[in-house]
Image (spheres, rainbow, N blue to C red):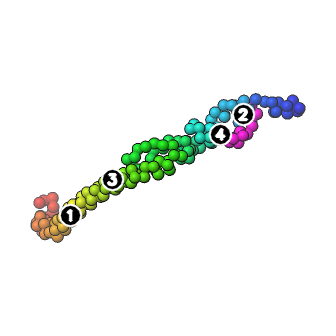
Amino acid sequence: RAVISQHGETCLFRLLPCEHCKDQVPFNGTETHMTTCKKFPLECPNNCGGTVPRDTLSSHVETECEEQEVECAVSGCGEKVKRREMEAHEEKNMRKHFRLIGFSLQAMQKQLQKTSTELEGTRAELQKATAQLLEAETGLPEIVESKKLKIPRGASESQV
């Protein structure tokens, strides 16, 4: 029994909990596991000083990392700055941003007017088509009646 107990403590295939994700990993597979462990801490590739679990690294870079370059949200500005510098960029470029937003608003108003005009045209066409349909529907019984075949009494339809 002592040999079995001793083997259990030194066996290369003994299962140990990963210190990061707590999954049971064979002792001889620990290094390999660390290359794929979702909770293994990685340094941010942007050198922001952050260390985050592998499974949240992309989220960190996309939404949090202060060193990540991001594009200005003002349509037409197009400048890219580090996230930590965005507030200063917005302050520095406020006049430019107001102009760009004004141009964008004017373009939207023109598009809205165009769409509104098109909608009125479509509405008029729909009203015209509805009136024509109602007119046709009103005369339909007379048309059907005039088109009916007169079948003599006592004759079957196959004889006609």
Mark 2 or 3, closer to the camera: 3
Task: Estimate how packed mark 4 is, as few (under 14), some (14 to 19) or many (20 or more) residues with alpha carbons within 10 Å.
Answer: some
Decide which of tag 4 and tag 3 comes sooner along the chain. 4
Residue at image mark 4: 41
Mark 4 or 2, closer to the camera: 4
Tag on residue 26? 2
Q: Secondary structure at mark 1?
A: helix
Residue at image mark 3: 103
Q: Position of residue 118 (x, y in %)?
A: 24, 58
Residue 22 falls within the magenta-colored stretch: yes
Mark 1 or 2, closer to the camera: 1
Task: Work out whether residue 145 can be spotted.
Answer: no
User: Which residues fall within the magenta stretch?
Assistant: 13-23
Mark 4 or 3, closer to the camera: 3
Mark 1 or 4, closer to the camera: 4
25 or 147: nearer the viewer = 25
> Image quarter for residue 55?
top right
Decide which of tag 4 and tag 2 comes sooner along the chain. 2
Task: Work out whether residue 10 can be spotted.
Answer: yes
Q: Position of residue 66 (x, y in %)?
A: 55, 44
Mark 4 → mark 2, Cα distance in angstroms? 20 Å
Q: Secondary structure at mark 3?
A: helix
Amino acid type, callout 1? Ala
Q: Residue at x 80, y 30 (%)?
A: 10
Q: Position of residue 149 (x, y in %)?
A: 12, 64
Q: Position of residue 129 (x, y in %)?
A: 19, 63
Q: Residue at x 45, y 49 (%)?
A: 92
Mark 1 → mark 2, Cα distance in angstroms? 75 Å
Task: Estimate how packed mark 1 is, as few (under 14), some (14 to 19) or many (20 or more) residues with alpha carbons within 10 Å.
Answer: few
